[in-house]
Image (cartoon, coloured by chain):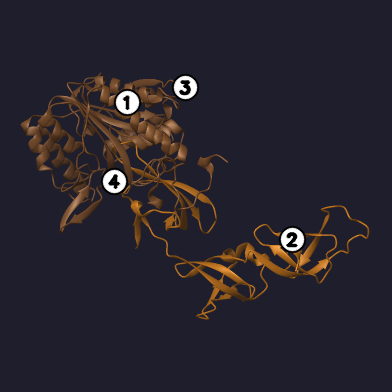
Chain colours: A orange, B brown
Amino acid sequence: MATYSTNQFKNGLKIILDGDPCSITENNMVKPGKGQAFNKIKAKNLRTGRVLERTFKSTESVEAADVDEMNVEYLYSDGESWHFMEPTSFEQYAADEVAVGDAIKWIKGQEVCVMTLWDGAPLTITPPNFVELAVAQTDPGLKGDTAQGATKPATLETGTEVKVPLFVNEGDILKIDTRTGDYVSRA
Amino acid sequence: MPADSAITQAWQSNASRETLLKRALMMKQIRAFFDVRDVVEVETPLLSRYSTTDPHLDSLGTRFREQDCYLNTSPEYAMKRLLARWQQPIYQICKAFRDDELGPNHNPEFTMLEWYRPGYDMMQLIDEVAGLVRSVFGQSEVDPVFESVSYQQAFEDVTGFDPHQVTAVQCFKYSVDNRVEIPQGLTADDDVDDWLDWLLTQRVLPAFKTDGFTFLYDYPATQCALAKLGPGSGQVNVAKRFELFYGELELANGFHELTDADEQLSRFQQENAQRLRAGKEVSRIDENFIAALRSGLPDCSGVAMGLDRFLMVLTGATSIDQVLSFAWQRS
């Protein structure tokens, strides 16, 4: 089992806390003068995204998390798993629903996503910041309604509903910001 | 946009021009303070063939002609050797280096002011430290406020227990009962001093006046380092050691100095044993320092003050980087 000592702590270091892989986001030394030092850290749980705060007696060891990140292309879903491929090795990975998470809402195939692997298995999938998706269904906008900022719901080809301006029609390709789920423009 | 909040590029200094000018002025004021008191400025080696035995400090090492040598963690041993020879008050402003110390209040290389006063006891030196702080603050409108509290009183006020009598198990129980976070790796089997250090940062220091100076004195005998032991307010002997804080920020550490060579040697050996238990390298004991004590160190008190942190207080900086020309990441 690989471990890190507190003097190796730095931002971005991947460690196991409460059985989950975490990434250190802040590491501060607490020392009252002469005497025992302590490390106060903040770490992001890579599975849940939650931020934890922990303190360690210095020189304490913590289990290292074997975490990798790579760019992968989304291939298809068989309903149970979502299949991705690393484009240089052609190696394929099957991510379950938990790992794919919200990415499901924005990917239809061929998008390049960032995959986090923990002990070789997909942990999270992050879709591209911007995707282009077609509108599958939306009601026609009312003629003459030019109210600034007025929106209506539209269902995208992935089945996700977003708010769009009134001028958007079925079949239009839209640019969407996946981080907020907001409509950006017509592509 | 104020200079301190401006985004600077990596080749530029961390501190603003204004802060660096304040640093220059602070140095001038400190030298003037000692000049009028006939305390002589000295210089001792930053690079030494000996390191420290302090179990909580690690020296940065390098090599000279295939011989291991170390950057000093403080100029204490060398200054005491001068003192044993001279028997007169001396001060030094120098760099000190400590491995693995980095954070909002720590930089691996920092500026230290250290001085020694033959004939002074701890309380006399505390008064002089306050005098120095006042003389540097004198140029500003704020009149610094000082409070003094013994280690025992400070703990009793906040936790209700006597730190000189408490055990690790009791500290553990106190922490559980009072919902004090317990660091991973700190257990009831640990040294009680590790617990006291932790509770000091979590409970005692946060109760200090936030915008004033506090002297904490008469430390537990087990945290004596290079201080003499003597009677405190209770029944047990305490270490004649003090620290100065501004709010929770530690600024200085002082001792009524231990002058007994045998006692010092035995403390060094105990510290080395502690290093061994902690899985650290054992340090070679500085024989020249022990020899100087044998020849006779005058009864004296001495103190080391972190000048970067003092400048943080003077400028209201929230991070040590803001008062350094080039902090570690830009060094």
Identify the residue under disc 2: A183
**Relative to the observer, which residue lies in front, B126 or A37?**
B126
Spot occupied by residue B93 in the image (x, y as percentages of width and height): 27, 36
CA gap, disc 4 to disc 1?
24 Å
For the point 56% across and 67% down, the residue is A114
**Relative to the observer, which residue lies in front, B312 or A22?**
B312
CA gap, disc 2 to disc 4?
53 Å
For the point 68% across and 65% down, the residue is A105
The label on residue B98 is 4
The chain that hosts pointer 1 is B
In what element is the residue under mark 3? loop
The label on residue B141 is 3
Marks 4, 1 in one chain: yes
For the point 22% across and 41% down, the residue is B54
The chain that hosts pointer 3 is B
Question: From the viewer's perspective, is B22 left or right of A137?
Answer: left
Spot occupied by residue B253 in the image (x, y as percentages of width and height): 28, 31
Is residue A96 placed above or below A150 in the rendered structure? below
Badge 1 crowding class, 10 Å Cα cut-off, few under 14, some 14 to 19, many 20 or more, is many
Badge 3 crowding class, 10 Å Cα cut-off, few under 14, some 14 to 19, many 20 or more, is few
For the point 71% across and 69% down, the residue is A132
